[in-house]
Amino acid sequence: MARKQGSHAGITGPKVREAALRLFARHGYAAVSMRQIAAVVGVQAGALYTYTPDKQSLLSDLMLEHMRELMATLAEAPGDAGPLAALEGFVRNHIRFHLPRADAVFVSYMELRNLTPENFARVEALRRQYEAVLEAILERGAEAGMLRRVDARVTAMALIALMTGVTNWYREGGRLPRAEIEEIYWDLVRRAVAA
């Protein structure tokens, strides 16, 4: 099929991902068709296959992109911080990264069940790497006597779930600004694991 006039790969590709993300977050992966995505983007359904092999690939690519971007923000953090500073940096970074990405967070957590086993393994490997960063911080903090001795794996997953949940209720322009939300979450995490 011919491309619609005005359609450009550098513009349309990102629009396909944005439309899919928004539709998956609003209606669920299983309820969204490639035709619906094409209609939002303003291209013919067949044209979508220029940008993605199929809907499953689109879903896994969105999740992988989310995790890669999140991991990249961790790579930017200073590596020589002490355990408490590292924990604070992790918490603040997590909140800062997730607040403006409610749709991506919802899809990344709620649509895991719709991934093929191969795609699930790829996404889960990145999630595990991210969790391992927090586990290592908790273990270093316990060894230094700055944080309580806890099951680092369970605690890391619980803290990540707590922090990621901010996107379920936070709305831009609400009662509290982002900086204050970040401060509250840092205080909650610090109190939860402080020695």
Image: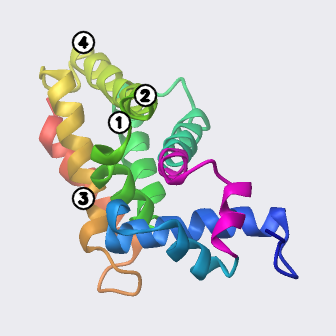
Tell whether label 3 touches label 2 (CB within 8 Å): no
The secondary structure type at the circle numbered 3 is loop
Label 2, label 3: how far apart the Cα atoms are: 27 Å
> As rendered, which of 62 and 96 lies closer to the eye?
62
Question: Which residue has dot 4 on it?
Answer: 143
Badge 2: residue crowd in 10 Å (few <14, some 14–19, many ≥20): few
The residue lying at 48 percent from left, 55 percent from top is 97
Which residue lies at the image location 82% right of the left edge and 79% below the top edge? Answer: 4
Secondary structure beneath label 4: helix
In the image, residue 24 lies at what x, y percent?
A: 40, 66
Q: Is 23 displayed left or right of 16 in the figure?
A: left
Pick the residue in front: 34 or 83.
34
Predominant secondary structure, magenta span = helix
Give the position of the C terminus as an image quadrant.
Answer: top left
For the N terminus, the quadrant is bottom right
User: Is there CB contact under 8 Å for labels 3 and 1?
Assistant: no
Which residue is denoted by mark 3 in the rendering?
165
Single out the mark in the foreground, 3 or 1.
3
Mark 2 vs 3, N-terminal side: 2
Asked if 37 appears above or below 145 in the picture, the reply is below
Label 3 amino acid? Gly
Neighbor class of circle 3 (other Cα within 10 Å; few <14, some 14-19, many 20+) is: some
Residue beneath disc 1: 87
> Which sits earlier in the primary sequence, circle 3 or circle 1?
1
Q: Bounds of the magenta span?
A: 44-62
Per the model, the C-alpha gap separating discs 3 and 4 is 29 Å
Amino acid, disc 2? Glu
SS of the residue under disc 2: helix
Q: Nearer the viewer, residue 102 or 138?
A: 102
